[in-house]
Image (cartoon, rainbow, N blue to C red):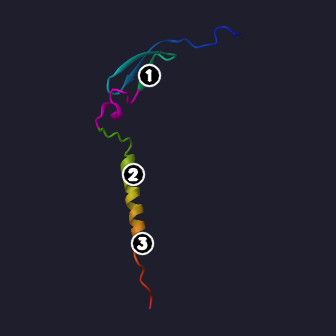
Amino acid sequence: MKTDIHPKYNDAEIRCACGNVIKTRSTRSTIIIGICNACHPFYTGQQKFVDTAGRVDKFQQRLAKTQAAQAAAAAPKKKKS
């Protein structure tokens, strides 16, 4: 087998946006993440709204437009005499 083909495996820190630091081992010395188990709503039990780039607002606008189109299509059409 070839020697020295594997990367160095050193101590590393995982840093969250909330300030939590987790010690582990990795090929990278520092890993920065946006959400971790200390601030994730599933683990904390707190309902926190994480909306990046207004995606929820865009979805709700599309939903309202679709519902309006469906209501207009379901309305009875007038017959021409």
Residue at the far top in the pictured view: 3
Q: What kind of residue is marked 2?
A: Lys
Closer to the chain start, of discs 2 and 3, is 2
User: As drawn, is 6 to the left or to the right of 54?
Assistant: right
Q: How many labels does the image show?
A: 3
In the rendered view, tell whether residue 63 sits above or below residue 33. below
Q: What kind of residue is marked 1?
A: Ile
Question: Which residue is drawn at the image coordinates 35% and 27% (left, top)?
Answer: 17
The verdict on residue 35 being magenta is: yes
Residue at the far left in the pictured view: 46
State how far apart marks 1 and 3 are (Cα).
53 Å
Quarter of the rendering occupied by the C terminus: bottom left
Q: Which residue in the structure is indicated by mark 3?
A: 74
In the rendered view, tell whether residue 66 sits above or below residue 21. below
Q: Say which element carries label 1.
A: strand
Quarter of the rendering occupied by the N terminus: top right
* Crowd around label 1: few <14 · some 14–19 · many ≥20 (10 Å): few
Q: Which residue in the structure is indicated by mark 2?
A: 58
Question: Which residue is drawn at the image coordinates 40% and 75% (left, top)?
Answer: 75
**Residue 80 picture location, percent across and down:** 45, 88
Query: Do labels 2 and 1 touch, CB within 8 Å?
Result: no
**Residue 19 picture location, percent across and down:** 32, 23
Magenta segment, which residues?
33-46
Picture disc at residue 31: 1
